[in-house]
Amino acid sequence: MIEFRQVTKRYDSEHTALRQVNFHLDRGELAFLTGHSGAGKSTLLKLVMVMERPSAGEVVVGGQVLNSLPRRQIPYIRRHIGVVFQNHQLLFDRTVFDNVAMPLEVMGASPRDSGRRVRAALDKVGLLSKEKMNPLQLSGGEQQRVGIARAVVNKPPLLLADEPTGNLDPKLSADIMNLFAQFSQVGVTVLIASHDLALINEMGRRTLTLDQGNLITGGTSLHGGVGGR
Amino acid sequence: MAADPSSKRRKPDPARGAKVSRSPWREQAESYFTHHRKVARDSAGRMWRTPVASLMTWTVMGVALALPVALLLLLTSLQGVSAGWESSARVTAYMKLSASLEQTRALADEIESDGRVAELELVDRDRALAEFRASSGLDDALDYLEENPLPHTLLITPKESARSADGVAALVTFIEGMDGVEQVQVDLGWLQRLNAMTDLLARAVWALAILLAAAVVLVIGNTVRLSIESRRDEILVAKLVGGTDGFVRRPFLYTGAWFGLGGGVVAWVLLQLSLWWLSGPVTRLAELYRSDFSLSSLSVDGALALIIAAMLLGWLGAWVAVKRHLDDIEPGEIAGG
């Protein structure tokens, strides 16, 4: 689903964010991405989202090489990637329902279809009763779940999460991780960037560790569950 | 959080697989138009929520549009005047004072038989004096004159086919060459001057219209730029979840078009008000000049064209802003790691 082939990302001559990173995530695989601040986690996620282009090597998502993807094709790639952000990136000028509906709206889904899918996604994260509320009225954990509902509402084959449990207490964090595990069971590839080593160890999944731009664990595996530490 | 607190409702399964189900094209088209309607309504709604700011933008646009349109209307009215006069162009031939009435009659018959002349009226010198006496108010002064200073006069109306500038000129030369004719006058000089002036005015109006249209585009562009800034987060999220450029631009283009609509309506109202305000004095002035001059007002077609042009200008302004500013907004940060 995601493949990095000798990917290097250099922002300028001083700063190299990723050095010759190689890895491959299969369909339905769940993996963690960890490392210190500045180790290159967000650069890696940005490369998958085509928010950045690699300086060398190839990034392949869903069988498509992203290096030379024309700018106007980028939206169509992003529609197949659900993203959960640490700071939620929710819009406070509309209801929870409308926030979750955004990915469907950009795809031009019919309102009927859209309503059904939004409710299904909200139901999945346990917030169906709050669809008419403004995200500002929700707690941090609830906002994060709204973000997850938005990321999965159009059933993307790939789910990226950036510190999804950053501000949450351990119980909520475990709930959210469970949710991700469920998605991977039904075939979604999930890549979670996280600092939370305790939680990562508890999950016992494959872990990609970055250190100063080098992938030091989890890079060689082609199948899940090997490189974890 | 339990994974499925309400699974009795529907089986939620947001992550079944890769493929997003494809709707048939009719449904796609339907949802496309639904989306357009929604965006259009939404943009209009945003405008209503800030009525004072919107009204100010509309007024600026309205004034900028009303000015050239008003001048164009004035121009049309003036051209109407000159057209009216051209069709009634008359050639006046003054006989020599020594020419007798019989001589003049003979000449009149000769001219009337010419193919280019539609109508001829002979005003003999006595009648001319009487008319002059009546219209000039110089009654007493004229009494002191020993003899009638006015010659016999022929008023000649050319046929339709000879009313061109060249045709009239040829007729004038023909009559001038005749015996007993002192002077031939075609009072087209002032008409030519008026024509030259309206031509000049027309160019000036068009130049002004273009400048003001550019101003409208810039005003709308700036307003839309502010609107883009205030909706930055929304644009970022839309781009992150796969919104195309077209999708992201759409609300702003509608915003521009709505500003145009408002501006067009304000311009129309301003025009109607000023026409109403001016119509009384203009009629009085025209009466004083014995002219049927009137200010032409905007027809329904004209009003529609004005509003549509305004909407296009608004759309164009929005497009300029969107092109300049929207494409710069790219999601850059998703994390701090």
Image (tube, coloured by chain):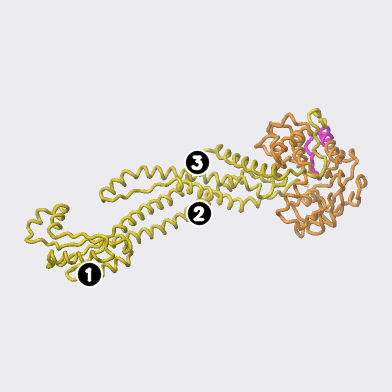
Residue A134 sits in quarter: top right
Quadrant of the rendering where the N terminus of chain B is positioned: top right
Residue located at (18% from left, 68% from top): B182
Left or right position of A212 against B147 = right
* Residue A118 visible within the image: yes
Tell which subunit mark 3 falls on: B
Tell me which segment is drawn in magenta: A158-176
Q: Which dot marks residue B176?
A: 1
Q: Colour of chain B?
A: yellow
x%, y% of residue B323?
A: 61, 53
Left or right position of A198 against B36 = right
Q: Colour of chain A?
A: orange
Asked whether A117 or B101 is in front, the reply is B101
Residue that numbered label 3 is attached to? B55
Tell which subunit mark 1 falls on: B
**Alpha-carbon distance for marks 2 and 3?**
20 Å
x%, y% of residue A161?
A: 79, 43
Residue that numbered label 2 is attached to? B214
